[in-house]
Image (spheres, rainbow, N blue to C red):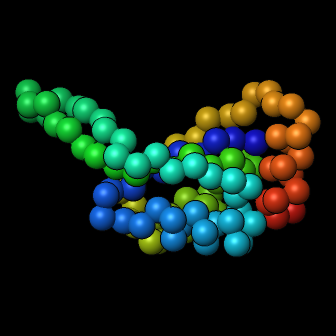
Amino acid sequence: MINMIVYLKKQHNPIELVEQLLRENLIASATIDENNTSYEVNNGVLDQQVNYVITMQTKALLFNEIAKIVEAKFGQETPINSVPIVSSNKTFEETIKSKTKKI
């Protein structure tokens, strides 16, 4: 099980993506963080970016399938990563198992 994290630019619609992935049973649940501000230094200048950050709970084996959908919709430059869910209670685990497609 993983938390899969996608960073979308402000001009994209995160709800459309979440709805598609839920309907296809690729994710069990998702949260959308609006107006997430990140900072980087580029060529000595502080660069501020505002994004939508989608955090989705799914099975690790579905990562590549989900990433392909995200990249097809929003481009290959869309940042995507995941972190393992190392432990959880039975309720959380069963939610992910029951709401995502069988592998």
Residue 53 x, y percent position in the rendering: 45, 47
User: How many dots with numbers?
Assistant: 0
- Judged left or right of residue 94, residue 44 is left
Q: Residue at x 64, y 41 (%)?
A: 3
Outermost residue to the front: 34
Q: Quadrant of the C terminus?
A: bottom right
Judge left or right: residue 27 versus residue 93. Answer: left
Q: Which residue is drawn at the image coordinates 71% and 72% (left, top)? A: 24
Direction from residue 34 to residue 89 in the image, left or right:
right
Q: Is residue 45 above or below residue 68?
A: above
Q: Residue at x 64, y 66 (%)?
A: 21
Q: Position of residue 89 (x, y in %)?
A: 86, 31
User: Who's the residue at 60% across and 69% down the image?
Assistant: 19
Give how far across and how far down residue 15 sits, in percent.
51, 65
**Quarter of the figure that contains the N terminus:** top right
Evaluate whether residue 7 shows in this view.
Answer: yes
Is any atom of residue 80 visible in this view?
Answer: no
Near-viewer residue (68 or 56): 56
